Image: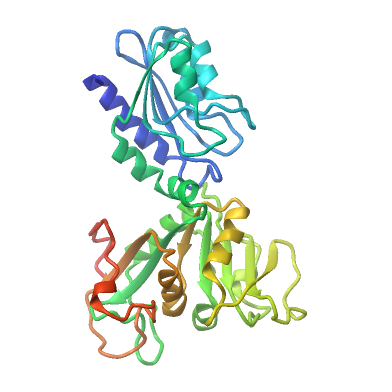
């Protein structure tokens, strides 16, 4: 059983892990706290960037000799493989750690096994401490590893009656400044931001992160089946890399050729492109989390493909009565098929 100090240390480790969101892909976010033999915090750290030291290494460096005989509290099972850095299991053993609490088992064949290595070396190992909290902070990466495709968060903004714009197409007033700032937080935490050609034509979105100091710009992905993107589209500037996904039979000779912009051909679906093929392409590029900002048609295609893991909706306290809906056909024909998000989180980011 964990002590109160160890449980508190895990809560802090989860908060530390969250600092890495948007910076560690294709690796997970991980936090670690080291307690000395008397239960006092002597070191802490988090995984700050892919290729850099893991959370355990940062925490052990801070603790130094005080780690000997102590306890390491980690949000994810310590890795047991050598990649760009060495195995954390061996680092913990070398530091003289006597006990390890980890929250969530590593689901990857490449890195799992750290718990067994630690136990074989005589380290006391316990799993599952505050597992739900650690799962939540690492949800995108864990989902990607378990399902073999990127985690997808669909973001939409709508009126109380479900309209994403007025009948004349105006929509920029729907959300508040606070809501728009929150969208930039979501972008900063994602590896890729995805829109469709309809949104591109209607809004000419930029899709880069603004007003987030130190943010890593996500890959901007345009699902443009017919290769209709115009050379002056804002998404083609050099603020962030861009991937244009077109149909296998689309003509692309007119598409812009410039640094930071790539084109990929994907198979068609009945309408648009095959969503599983798009996600497989992104996963192969190291994308572990996707923010879906596309319009109602693309959102419907993702939902119909069973490829939406979480939904964030910004609802404005207004009614329109007409105009495009926030969601188009998602293959749902009866109330029994209605999709019900497993978690509901209601937060007021602003006045509307």
How many numbered circles does the render carry?
0
Asked if residue 298 lies left or right of residue 263, the reply is left
Percent of width and height locating residue 300: 41, 75
Asked if residue 245 lies left or right of residue 324, the reply is right
Q: Looking at the image, which is closer to me, 33 or 81?
A: 81
Relative to 231, is 293 above or below?
Answer: above
Relative to 349, is 265 above or below?
Answer: below
The image quadrant where one finds the C terminus is bottom left
Residue 83 in which image quadrant: top right
Query: How has the structure been colored for display?
Result: rainbow
Asked if one can make out residue 304 in the rendered structure from this viewpoint, the answer is yes
Residue under the image location 53 percent in, 11 percent down:
94
Residue under the image location 54 percent in, 26 percent down:
80
Relative to 134, is 58 above or below?
Answer: above
Q: Looking at the image, which is closer to me, 97 or 186?
A: 97
Q: Looking at the image, which is closer to me, 289 or 20?
A: 289
Percent of width and height locating residue 49: 55, 38
Relative to 27, is 84 above or below?
Answer: above
Percent of width and height locating residue 244: 64, 70
Residue 125 in which image quadrant: top left
Residue under the image location 57 percent in, 75 percent down:
273
Asked if one can make out residue 62 in the rendered structure from this viewpoint, the answer is no
Q: Looking at the image, which is closer to me, 45 or 2?
A: 2
The image quadrant where one finds the N terminus is top left
Percent of width and height locating residue 23: 52, 44
């Amino acid at each position: 059983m964990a002590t109160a100090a160890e449980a508190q240390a895990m809560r802090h480790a989860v908060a530390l892990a969250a600092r890495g969101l948007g910076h560690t892909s294709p690796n997970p976010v991980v936090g670690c706290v080291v307690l000395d033999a008397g239960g006092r915090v002597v070191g802490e750290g988090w995984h700050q960037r892919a290729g850099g030291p893991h959370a355990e290494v940062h925490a052990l460096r801070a603790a130094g000799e005080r780690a000997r005989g102590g306890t390491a509290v980690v949000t994810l099972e310590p890795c047991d493989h050598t990649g760009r850095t060495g195995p954390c299991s061996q680092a913990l053993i070398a530091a003289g750690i006597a006990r390890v609490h980890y929250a969530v088992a590593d689901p990857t064949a490449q890195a799992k096994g750290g718990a067994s290595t630690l136990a074989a070396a005589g380290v006391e190992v316990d799993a599952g401490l505050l597992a739900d909290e650690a799962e939540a902070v690492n949800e995108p990466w864990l989902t990607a590893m378990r399902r073999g495709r990127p985690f997808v968060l669909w973001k939409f903004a709508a009126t109380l009656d479900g309209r994403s714009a007025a009948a004349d197409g105006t929509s920029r007033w729907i959300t508040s400044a606070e809501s728009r700032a929150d969208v930039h937080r979501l972008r900063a935490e994602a590896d890729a931001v995805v829109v469709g050609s309809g949104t591109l034509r209607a809004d000419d979105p930029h899709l880069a992160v603004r007003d987030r100091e130190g943010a890593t710009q996500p890959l901007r992905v345009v699902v443009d089946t017919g290769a209709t993107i115009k050379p002056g589209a804002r998404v083609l500037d050099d603020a962030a890399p861009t991937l244009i996904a077109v149909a296998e039979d689309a003509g692309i000779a007119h598409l812009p050729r410039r640094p930071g912009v790539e084109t990929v051909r994907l198979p068609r679906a009945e309408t648009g492109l095959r969503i599983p093929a798009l996600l497989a392409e992104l996963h192969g590029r190291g994308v572990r989390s996707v923010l879906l900002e596309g319009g109602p048609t693309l959102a419907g295609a993702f939902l119909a493909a069973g490829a939406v893991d979480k939904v964030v909706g910004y609802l404005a306290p207004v009614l329109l009565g007409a105009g495009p809906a926030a969601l188009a056909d998602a293959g749902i024909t009866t109330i029994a098929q209605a999709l019900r998000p497993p978690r509901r989180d209601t937060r007021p980011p602003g006045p509307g």
